[in-house]
Image: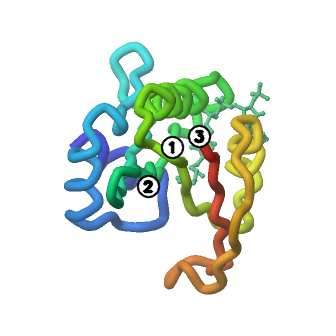
Amino acid sequence: QSLQRLNACLFPVKYKDTYYRDAVLAGSYTKLAFYKDACVGNIACRLEETGPYIRVYIMTLGVLPSYRRMGIGSKLLQSVLGLCQQDPRVVDVYLHVQTNNDEAMEFYKNFDFQIVDTIFNYYIRLDPPDCYVLSRRLR
Ligand code: ACO
């Protein structure tokens, strides 16, 4: 419920049941951030297993506007990167970001994410509809 409420404030997309199922199945790869008693941020991942390998897909990472630039987003991402480093099956972490999202691009650059692809018309209801695929390889 906290995740649902946060996402409604943060993202222009309504998430389906599968998003919440995947987020829960990802265990500690999905986290909420609290500031005092308030839930102010989240990172939600999906673990994609193929054979012996796991790709970690970041479905959402967001912090409420009044709590940005305080290091909360970095803490959430660092905790996931830490889990990835501990699991030798994880080969990379990747995500989609809308091409005009300069804040997110700056943010992910700090963590050595690279643009590996551009997908045109990825989003149905957003303008621009295009996204970059950002990836950080682990091994
Ligand atoms: N402009 C430029 N650089 C930025 C910005 C910004 N608005 N925000 C973060 N950065 C960079 C800076 O280098 C910053 O370090 P500094 O504050 O010392 O200069 C660094 O990232 C770390 O910032 P944090 O404080 O850790 O990040 P924050 O808690 O503000 O969260 C986030 C960043 C998650 C991108 C936030 O802006 C947000 O919630 N945006 C809306 C949702 C969103 O776009 N999420 C990502 C979409 S992609 C996806 O979800 C998979």
- Residue 98, percent from left and from top: 64, 66
Q: Is mark 3 within 8 Å of ligand 1?
A: no
Identity of the residue drawn at 35% across and 51% down: 52
Circle 1 residues within 10 Å: few <14, some 14–19, many ≥20: many
> Which residue is label 2 attached to?
59
Q: Residue furthest front?
A: 52
- When the figure is inspected, residue 39 is found, relative to residue 43, above or below; the finding is above
Which one is nearer the viewer's eye here, 18 or 38? 18
Q: Nearer the viewer, mark 1 or mark 2?
A: 2
Q: CA distance from mark 3 to mark 1?
A: 23 Å
Amino acid type at image mark 3: Leu
Find out whether the residues at labels 3 and 1 contact each other: C-beta distance under 8 Å.
no
Q: Could you tell me if residue 1 is visible in this image? A: yes
Which one is nearer the viewer's eye here, 33 or 97? 97
Say whether disc 3 or disc 1 marks the residue closer to the N-terminus.
1
Identity of the residue drawn at 73% across and 40% down: 112
Q: Is mark 2 within 8 Å of ligand 1?
A: yes
- Residue 111, percent from left and from top: 70, 36
Task: Specify the quadrant of the image occupied by residue 15.
Answer: bottom left
Left or right of residue 15: residue 100: right
Amino acid type at image mark 2: Met
Left or right of residue 42: residue 103: right
Taking the image as four quarters, which one is ligand 1 found in?
Answer: top right
> Which residue is label 1 attached to?
62
> Which residue is label 3 attached to?
138
- Residue 91, percent from left and from top: 51, 47
Q: Is mark 1 within 8 Å of ligand 1?
A: yes
- Residue 49, percent from left and from top: 33, 56
Which one is nearer the viewer's eye here, 12 or 21? 21
- When the figure is inspected, residue 127 is found, relative to residue 65, above or below; the finding is below
Q: Which mark is residue 127?
A: none
Identity of the residue drawn at 37% across and 24% down: 38
